[in-house]
Image (cartoon, grey):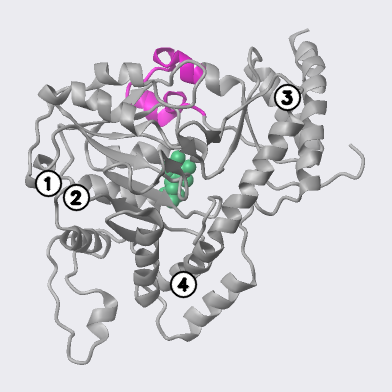
Amino acid sequence: MDDKRNIAFSPPDIGQAEIDAVADAMRSGWITTGPKTKELERKLTEFTGAAGVACLSSATAALECALRALGIGEGDEVITSAYTYTASCSPICHVGATPVLVDTAPGSFEMNYAELGDLITERTKAIVPVDIAGRMCDYDRIEGVLATKRVLWKPENDLQRLFDRVIIVADAAHSLGADYHGRKSGSVADFTTFSFHAVKNFTTAEGGALAWRDAGFDSDEFYRGIMLQSLHGQTKDALAKTQASAWEYDIAFPGWKCNMTDIQAAIGLVQLERYPALLARRREIIARYEKGLADTDAILLGHYGGWANSSGHLMLVRMPRKSEAFRNAVIEVMAEDGVATNVHYKPLPLFTAYRTLGFDIADYPNAYRQYCCEITLPLHTKLSDDDVDYVVASFKRALIEADSRVLQESD
Ligand SMILES: *Cc1c(COP(=O)(O)O)cnc(C)c1O
């Protein structure tokens, strides 16, 4: 196309305020977990309406910590979606539990709630729904399914006994700031994991958080348990140990290492101030895409309306009845125009790791069909309106051009 641009897929939106905050943290004399991390936890608790929030090094770490805190491990089963990133599932493997994957509903990116009940056994301890693209799952429906399987629920420790059904640990890596029936992500599922990785809506470069709802356990004690897990099982963090003559500590158990640093939290505190404006800009961009693509037969994920307001994380687009080769050709043509796109997601059973665990893509026909014709367009707050129009024009050009390329290939 004329006046070729370079449109990145998801660059971080870092401004002078974040840069200044990092410099301040660096000069403050305290760079690892400390007052800024604690402040970010307080602010995220307020923002999400959760009972408590623990900041950690990643969403993956948050999910692992949650599963361990719940005492989930060998002999247990945990259900998640086949249509997600590996990090929704690998923590299940890390704690020694058995992952169970559920197919998507036909034509949907969400797990097939109708199939969910059949997968629950006496060993099922948790389910990890994925708020794909920032749109929250139908948690009332999930709770409804779990309620019908209450007779199979076999809690095995005090924390599990506070629940009368399989525990919901949401993979909300995409959905910070989203809401469901007016409730914010973080206060809907029993436990919620957020990612602050560089490509996410809200970033601390690397980072994540675990949020929880009030389920009758002591929030402060639960928080201390997560902190212990994240810092070697050590009973005093580095800051507490700096108090004069307060050197002594205990190691409660051989813990892990996945704490957040104050440098990361400094970025997060600025991002949180800016976040309402960032979410509003995402909404504008999505509206512009919807308008620009209305005259194509591409189907855009509905981010807003009904019971949910998405955080507008990913612009998922389906090209119905198109082949995988066609989708790949569209990606190529758009790359020639300087537009970076992506695919969300390649279903887990297509990867070596999950094939090796015995998963077969033939058992996930809906997820497979969904994947074959999916393309993710750039959606981020560094895009100007003109950039969005350029992506729309490139996508339309690609829809025409891809047809002839695929034909040539099959000659
Ligand atoms: C990014 C992502 C994660 C992992 O987040 P990290 O903070 O990198 O651990 C998990 N699930 C989904 C769906 C993601 O997109």
Write the residue at 74% across / 22% down: 296
Q: Residues within 10 Å of mark 4 (few under 14, many from 20)?
A: many
How far is disc 4 from disc 2 in space, using C-alphas? 26 Å
Report the amino acid beneath label 4: Ile
Q: Nearer the viewer, mark 2 or mark 1?
A: 1
Name the residue beneath numbered marker 3.
329
The first of marks 4 and 2 along the sequence is 2
Q: Please tell me the numbered disc located at residue 32.
A: none
Name the residue beneath numbered marker 4.
263
Q: Which residues are magenta?
A: 346-368
How far is disc 3 from disc 4 in space, using C-alphas? 42 Å
Q: Residues within 10 Å of mark 1 (few under 14, many from 20)?
A: some
Name the residue beneath numbered marker 2.
69
Write the residue at 83% across / 27% down: 397
Write the residue at 40% across / 41% down: 87
Report whether the residue tagged 3 is closer than 8 Å to ligand 1.
no
Q: Residues within 10 Å of mark 2 (few under 14, many from 20)?
A: some
Image position, residue 249 (x, y; %): 14, 76
Q: Contact (CB < 8 A) between labels 4 and 2?
A: no
Q: Residue furthest bottom?
A: 244
Name the residue beneath numbered marker 1.
159
Q: Is 145 rendered above or below residue 106? A: below
Q: Is 158 rendered above or below residue 290? A: below
**Residue 294 painted magenta:** no
Locate ligand 1 by image quadrant.
Answer: top left
Helix, strand or loop at mark 2:
helix
The first of marks 3 and 4 along the sequence is 4
Helix, strand or loop at mark 4:
helix
